[in-house]
Amino acid sequence: MADSDGLGEAAIAAASPSVSAPGLSPSLGWRERLRAGLAGTGASLWFVAGLGLLYALRVPLRLCENLAAVTVFLNSLTPKFYVALTGTSSLISGLIFIFEWWYFHKHGTSFIEQVSVSHLRPLMGGTESSISEPGSSNNRESETSRQNLSECKVWRNPLNLFRGAEYRRYTWVTGKEPLTYYDMNLSAQDHQTFFTCDTDFLRPSDTVMQKAWRERNPPARIKAAYQALELNNDCATAYVLLAEEEATTIVDAERLFKQALKAGETIYRRSQQCQHQSPQHEAQLRRDTNVLVYIKRRLAMCARKLGRIREAVKIMRDLMKEFPPLTMLNIHENLLESLLELQAYADVQAVLAKYDDISLPKSAAICYTAALLKTRTVSDKFSPETASRRGLSTAEINAVEAIHRAVEFNPHVPKYLLEMKSLILPPEHILKRGDSEAIAYAFFHLQHWKRIEGALHLLQCTWEGTFRMIPYPLEKGHLFYSYPSCTETADRELLPSFHHVSVYPKKEIPFFIHFTAGLCSSTAMLAFLTHQFPEIMGVFAKAVLGFSCLQPRHPQFLSRTHKI
């Protein structure tokens, strides 16, 4: 998201009140306001009408006599009944409270509130009250929906781990599954997009691999990869699948990827020669290009994990030069991490100058790396006490502003960098500005922040100041668009269940949870008091009921007193 987007929003918001929707008269606006006000008070009018009807029919319905009969019935009840009643009420309200609390922690909203808003409010005639003009409100709603769709897009993690050599080893050690079904299903869709095309039926090995990428069971996929190799020993995608899922070490994965590279280059050169013969050959070339780029990228990641960092940097630079249209793969984020490991900060700055651009989408890696470079120049000498006495220097102001910019883009990252939350293995897909992206960034970049003296200390002293500039992050941002409200739901799908998802902004506990908790506590207390002091509580209950029964007789008593 471009930095100028927030300024553009502010300009639009400042200019919008002065622009009136065409074709609207003042009388129509007054009617719309009146209609909105009447719709909002519909429930209150129904309630007042019901009370009036009940008062008018009090004589035919013999309300006073029936109330007296109810009073006699209640006076005949024993304290044991009140104990059972309050105990049962306490149990029911306690169950409701437990369910509400569980539903809130799982879905982030109150079940009672959701049901009342979704189902009961339309029945009672409630509508969204809005006094703004219909044309402008519809435009703003459509613009907001487009923003949410773009912000809540799930991206492939450019630094995703190897399933066999890393994710599966974690499962063997801990017994926990680090990947969710939703995440793996997205990866299966990516594999079918990258590694298959319409001409797969021309080669039997590709036909087998097309079925292999659709398999959900890992052993079945591995078995299909071996079947493809039996049909064609130069099937590059079969080696890719074995390197990703069967290899149990990075060394084994690199060996299989090298075999895949040899086969992939041969197929790629062959496709280049035939690309202009038909549209099918062009699609085949695109598929073979994707396979070759994927193999080289994973080989670079293998070299990075095995300590051959300069080799990894060279492979990534060559990929970015040879295939510049494939910037959507975010290979520059792999390059940034490798250059930081080499402490080649000048090269990092050169990469940022190219990709930290207004017209390009942002990421946590870009924003926080830019903040790290500016923090590096002042962090070793920064002291809050000294800064409070003499003020911040220009370099310190730039560093703090860069931190605020990064935190506004993804407010979840500092908790992991400062080790306030425990890290887990990053998922294969991330949601930008979400908790999944924060985990993926901190998992690889925490060591780079620790290497620079004082960087984490400066981050700790300044990151919370960001929230003073964006008091309502869901409505309006400062440098970026408003924070999307869909991140929590998507992150819960991407991250494993044993991880406590970070939520921003922090949601307040709904009213109904407080209400059910108070109801459960009060009824439990009444049950205990009635059981311990039955006579006193019985007198108290009769007094309360007697007072309520005497209320209708007060006007008659006053009239008699007036006659006397």
Image (cartoon, grey):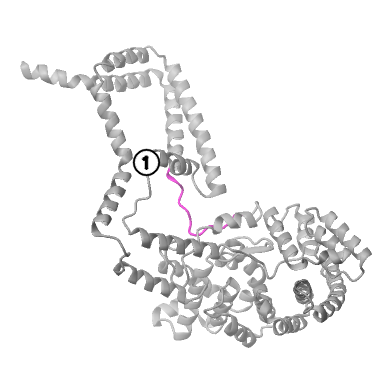
User: Can you name the residue that lies furthest to the right here?
Assistant: 230
Residue toward you, 557 or 192:
192
At 77% from the left edge and 82% from the top edge, which residue is drawn?
A: 311
Q: What predominant SS class does the magenta segment belong to?
A: loop
Q: Could you tell me residue 478's position as x and y percent?
A: 43, 71
Residue 247, quarter of the rendered image: bottom right
Q: Is residue 508 magenta?
A: yes
| Quarter that holds the C terminus | top left
Name the side, left or right, on which 136 lies relative to 358: left
Total residue callouts: 1
User: Can you name the residue that lies furthest to the left here?
Assistant: 564
From where the camera sits, is residue 254 visible?
A: yes
Residue 316, quarter of the rendered image: bottom right
Residue toward you, 347 or 460:
347
At 52% from the left edge and 83% from the top edge, which residue is drawn?
A: 378
Q: Is residue 251 magenta?
A: no
Q: Could you tell me residue 127's position as x and y percent?
A: 38, 47
Q: Could you tell me residue 424's position as x and y percent?
A: 67, 60
Q: Is residue 227 above or below residue 50?
A: below
Range drawn in magenta: 500-511
Residue toward you, 316 or 456:
316
Residue 303, quarter of the rendered image: bottom right
From where the camera sits, is residue 242 visible?
A: no
At 60% from the left edge and 57% from the top edge, which residue is drawn?
A: 491
In the rendered image, which residue does mark 1 sit on? Answer: 125
Q: Amino acid at mark 1?
A: Gly
Q: Label 1 neighbourhood size at 10 Å, few (<14), some (14-19), many (20+)?
A: few
Residue toward you, 539 or 424:
424
Q: Could you tell me residue 112's position as x and y percent?
A: 47, 40
At 71% from the left edge and 84% from the top edge, which residue is drawn?
A: 317
